[in-house]
Amino acid sequence: MRIDVGMQKGGVGKTTTSINLAGALADRGHDVLAVDADPQGGLTLKLGYREQYREGEYALYDVLSEMGRLSLDDLDDLIVSGDEFDIVPSHIRNFRLEKHLYSEARGVEALKIALDRLTAEYDYVVIDSPPNLGPLADGALLAAENVLFPSNANTIAKDSLEILFDEIDTLEDKFDDVQISTVAAVLNEVGQDGVSNEMRTWFVETFGEEYVFEIPDWAAVEHAIEYRTSVFAYNPDDAGYPWDADKTDQLRTKYNAIAAQVESLNND
Amino acid sequence: MRIDVGMQKGGVGKTTTSINLAGALADRGHDVLAVDADPQGGLTLKLGYREQYREGEYALYDVLSEMGRLSLDDLDDLIVSGDEFDIVPSHIRNFRLEKHLYSEARGVEALKIALDRLTAEYDYVVIDSPPNLGPLADGALLAAENVLFPSNANTIAKDSLEILFDEIDTLEDKFDDVQISTVAAVLNEVGQDGVSNEMRTWFVETFGEEYVFEIPDWAAVEHAIEYRTSVFAYNPDDAGYPWDADKTDQLRTKYNAIAAQVESLNND
């Protein structure tokens, strides 16, 4: 099963959600691959693969563009083994990929085709999407057919989601056999103010209670990521933030619930 | 004179640089327009135009796309008067603009054509560009023909700039009469470590000493922007951060120097 962590708005926690969902699924005993489809390389850099991002020999660019040196069979060559889960890192060269995919025949389908040809086997593939509506973001929706959207609990969230849903409708119209399902909405940085309450209510009414997950606190997440892991591989004592222990546990519970939701949709 | 604040990498300080360059030029007595060409709307939101971003009746989308309700003459209608300088705010609807411009005849030229038809007169137009290499970013380069690139003093900066320069070469090849000049490199978050020193040296060797500006400290900039102004309109006492006063002065001196550099290129 593939899950696209997608939202055209930047700064809503896409990368953090991707890392922790991948970590939760791995912690539950699954083989997981995280694909960094954002040319900005947040997931790649946060997990410590700076060399790969800057100087890796091959990149998604090479696999997904006809002009590249590799072929669509070779996505396997990009996979880097990680302690928690494997990743296909981003590469600074991927900034050129988006433009390329616009003009390429089947450009939007390229990621799906490449993932279909993957020889390495994974239970779950988590795709971290770029913050726009370009062919890489569309390609991630198409490749996964399941979307989990992180959002802030602010008043722009409704508009952002409306735009994303229009995009999903357009893709479903263009590709007859494609049906994109909602996995979950992850509300980040939920505060105790009126706006947050109102938005939480709106999300629950719109998606149903079981599809809405709130992430209450960011510090422990950020500390985990400084440590280049999800909250599941993070040890607050080793990292020097012992006071994070309770919050880390709470966050594990939260992301575990999201992973369980993903599993239940996979079994339907 | 138009200046594009451009860099495909996100998180390097494009919006902060745009706001403070516009503020510096305004402080020096010029009429300035800041155009928020990033669908994420950082400049618009940071300057407090949240309503415009979410619910404004018209948007760049309407002006630059043939399907829109407005015509190319009507960029004037989007202008919002500000205390320091005027702005063309971004709009959440602009997320759809990028895709549209790819398929539109002369899509990349649309912003240039719209700015050429502007009735309101400005001494300087500062364009805050989105963090990718799509048609809005290309359009901003083409519309301005002058680019100022903010960068972090890290080792990815060289790669980022190489990619941006390739893009500029490609645009100059496609449009015979276009020549894009470097206004300045603004190095943000420069630390005292070896990497920062090495990168500073590389920038100075590459662009020449007079083209490289360092912004040493972010806190006062961030406080100013919380206050919805550039550092020039920001009063640390009123804002409740009196200890910012010295740093604010230093930052004014820095951005003033960049503005003076812009003026000198305008007079050449």
Image (cartoon, coloured by chain):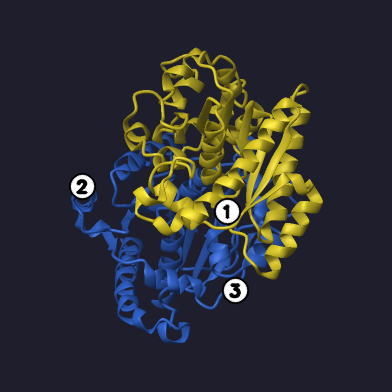
Chain colours: A yellow, B blue
Q: What residue type is labelled 1?
A: Gln
Q: Give above or below for A236 relative to A48.
A: below
Name the residue located 65 percent from the left edge and 67 percent from the top edge. Answer: A192
- Within-10-Å neighbours for mark 1: few <14, some 14–19, many 20+: many
Name the residue located 32 percent from the left edge and 60 percent from the top edge. Answer: B265
Q: Could you say where residue A253 lies in the image, as x and y percent from the top left?
A: 59, 46
A22 lies left or right of B258: right
- The residue indicated by pointer 1 is B40
Secondary structure under tag 3 reads: loop
Residue B81 vs residue A121, the one in the foreground: A121
A262 lies left or right of B9: right
B171 lies left or right of B119: left
**For marks 3 and 1 on the same chain, the one whose residue lies earlier in the sequence:** 1
Secondary structure under tag 1 reads: loop
Q: Give above or below for B170 relative to B113.
A: above
Q: Do labels 3 and 1 share a chain?
A: yes
Cα distance, mark 2 to mark 3? 40 Å
User: Which chain is mark 1 on?
Assistant: B
Quadrant for residue B120, please give it.
bottom right
- The residue indicated by pointer 2 is B202
Q: Give above or below for A126 relative to B19.
A: above
State which quarter of the image contains the C terminus of chain B.
bottom left
- Within-10-Å neighbours for mark 2: few <14, some 14–19, many 20+: some
